[in-house]
Amino acid sequence: MPFLSPVRTSRQRVVGAGAPRIHRAWWVALAGFVAMVGAAGFRSVPGVLINPLHEEFGWSHGTIGMAVSINMLLYGLFSPFAAALMDRFGIRPVLTAALLLLATGGGLTVFMTQPWQLWLLWGFLVGLGAGSISMAFIATLVNRWFVTQRGLVSGVLTAAGAAGQLIFLPAVAWLATSYGWRVPALFVAGTALLVLPLVLYAVRDHPHEIGLEAYGASESAPTQPRAARTGNAAAMALSGLAEAARTRTFWLLAGGFAVCGASTNGLVGTHFVPAAHDHGMPLTAAAGLLAVIGIVDIIGTIGSGFLTDRIDPRLLLAVYYTLRGLSLMALPTLFGPEVQPSMWAFIIFYGLDWVATVPPTVALCQEHFGDKAPVVFGWVFASHQVGAAVAATGAGLIRDTQGSYDFAWLGAGALCLLATVCSLLVPRHRASSPVSAFG
């Protein structure tokens, strides 16, 4: 059975005996999944609240989009530092602090009256908290707890973001419509606090802490004990960037992932609901469509993880970016007051591709950068969020100046085709030198 420990090592015999049981790595992965679902709830809220905030305070789409941009920028830029902090202090303390930041930043927004307060709370505090429970966290957990099935686990954990969107978007839209935007803000903040006990109970930094080997390790090739870390976390993150930045692989992956962020979180995740509302679609209906993207994305991302273990990740990325670009170019013709079959086709097609890019990107970082992969992927993910931040503000400005989002959809589609080229130019990995990218 795939979820059972495949090899009973000497470490495992010390801890337990008897009938085979589910390997602890899967429980840690489950706790990570739930934590990412909670973080995703915060990231799904701004797109739904743009119109309510605009109506109550008179703030422009660009002003509100700036808060989303700050959030997305910090979500990405703090990711490699979070990976270094997890390496220095452990996974559980960093996750605990992140959940507390999310709850504090979200809860205090109910008292705001000025744009700068939105930027500080939803932009800065929530951005830092979410940045600690981001894709670099996935890379760290997978590297520590799994030797086999890494692509599949990466896909499942990445799908947690879609699951969070699925859970929170309809609820947030309904609460905002029925009770105003403050109630959903408190709802999501409370949810972050509810996740905290599970993290404290289930998550451990490394399998050796509880006398286990990582899932898939064998007695002939056990995982190495994790050395104690005493260095400065910021220095570790910056040195990882300095080494990776000397390679072509890093810049190709970062460039493609910047487009990924711009064409998903920054554009569709933030502006799809108000764009649909511009064409007469009710707020709850538009939010429901985003939730369906979340449902479909769970299938697409887990499937992508499965394929990543079997197919060249570069080719997968090229296919994903091409299909996404073509679908975004068709989107402006699909909006209307009613949800037509053509819009449903887009939602399903686009949803399968939403974050399917993550497992192959993680795999390429692991192949080219070895044990530095979590920090390097943190920087690659930072580029993802830089792209998302630019798109969140840029699309809002396009809407303010042009009166529609059409140019934003077409521009994002063209950038996706450029990302296809970047993916195909990533060098083939040299199996004999797993960290040759730094050579």
Image: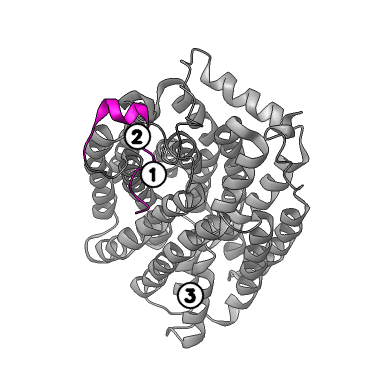
Instruction: Judge from the rendering whether residue 14 lies leftward or rightward of residue 148; answer left or right.
Output: left
The disc placed on residue 399 is: none
Q: Amino acid at mark 2?
A: Leu
Give the Cα distance between marks 3 and 2. Answer: 34 Å
From which residue to which does the magenta span run?
1-18
What is the x, y in percent for residue 196? 25, 37
Residue ID at (44%, 44%): 115
Mark 3 packing: few (<14 Cα in 10 Å), some, or many (20+)? some
- Check if mark 1's residue and mark 2's residue have beta carbons within 8 Å: no
Mark 1 or mark 2, which is nearer to you? 1
- 3 or 2: tag closer to the N-terminus: 2
* Relative side of 2 to 85, left or right: left
Residue 6, disc:
1
Q: Local crowd at mark 2 within 10 Å, few (<14), some, or many (≥20)?
A: many
Q: Secondary structure at mark 2?
A: helix
- Give the residue number, with chain letter if any, for mark 2: 101
Which numbered dot is residue 348? 3
Give above or below for 225 relative to 154.
Answer: above
Residue type at tag 1 = Pro
Please provide percent x and percent y for residue 437.
73, 34
Residue drawn where x is 21% and y is 38% of the image: 18
Is 3 inside the magenta-drawn segment? yes
Q: CA distance from mark 1 to mark 2?
A: 38 Å
Q: Residues within 10 Å of mark 1 (few under 14, many from 20)?
A: some
Characterize the magenta stretch by its predominant secondary structure.
Answer: loop
Mark nearest the camera among 3 and 2 is 3
Would residue 436 appear left or right of 353 to someone viewing this image? Answer: right
Q: Residue at x 77, y 28 (%)?
A: 439
